[in-house]
Image: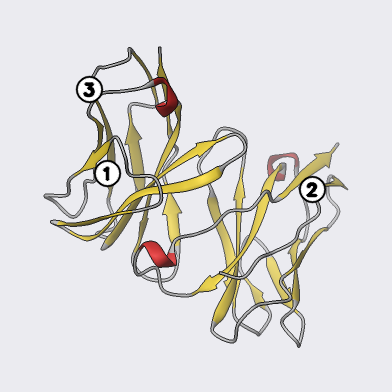
Amino acid sequence: DAGITQSPRYKITETGRQVTLMCHQTWSHSYMFWYRQDLGHGLRLIYYSAAADITDKGEVPDGYVVSRSKTENFPLTLESATRSQTSVYFCASSSGDTQYFGPGTRLTVL
Amino acid sequence: DAKTTQPPSMDCAEGRAANLPCNHSTISGNEYVYWYRQIHSQGPQYIIHGLKNNETNEMASLIITEDRKSSTLILPHATLRDTAVYYCIVRVGFFGGATNKLIFGTGTLLAVQP
């Protein structure tokens, strides 16, 4: 019963590099979400997906790309990482009225 | 989503009940009250939600006032592992897109003392 997992849990990268954060859920939930959490801002929605091959922007999508070829996976890519993208990233999934969150990925961009 | 007001912090003795209040005076008729918590460095964890009736599950109880303008989350026997930030969120029930995203406020830091 893995639920929702994220990898890697910690990542250090350099400005300008491409980084992909992985999210996998075992519940076959239709909806999946990516949030970032920063001090002073709480959790902010980056992108979400209603089903495989259906994605849409959230509050802060600039600099991020998502894809969802399979229901269970929802990777988040930073095409050219910037220092302002240093944050903790949380993936979540939902089948209806409740969201369940993954453990998070702590990303540092130097 | 309606705005919520929570105290910034609370203390509770281990083994005692923790009662966390939340004011949501502008809640709409179709909005639910949700509670999540976030233990340090972990992802937010769903606790419970309700519309107007009191709810109980294995983690907690949720008491919603008759006018729905406030609610209380009750952890019946707090343990040290319950130390976390607790978020009260009001929103429509179906997570159907960005307009239905969760909006986390600043929450209440509950410190359970030994």
x%, y% of residue A84?
Answer: 43, 26
Badge 2 crowding class, 10 Å Cα cut-off, few under 14, some 14 to 19, many 20 or more, is: few
Of discs 3 and 1, which sits in the foreground?
A: 3
Q: Nearer the viewer, residue B40 or A35?
A: A35
Mark 2: secondary structure: loop
In the drawing, does residue B84 fall left or right of residue B110?
left
Q: Is residue A81 visible?
A: yes
Q: Position of residue B110 (x, y in %)?
A: 77, 46
Amino acid type indicated by mark 2: Pro
For the point 54% across and 51% down, the residue is B45
* Residue on which the image places disc 3: A18
Place residue B70 in its image quadrant: bottom right
Q: Which residue is mark 2?
A: B8
Label 3 and label 1 in one chain: yes
**Disc sitting over residue A41 in the figure:** none
| Whether residue A1 is situated above or below residue A63 in the rendered picture | below
Q: Is residue B107 above or below residue A9?
A: below
Mark 1, residue position: A24
Give the residue type at disc 1: His
Residue A50 horizontal/vertical position (percent) = 25, 63
- For the C terminus of chain A, which image quadrant? top left
Q: Residue at x 13, y 56 (%)?
A: A53
- Which comes before the other along the chain, label 3 or label 1? 3
On the image, which quarter does residue A5 sit in? top left
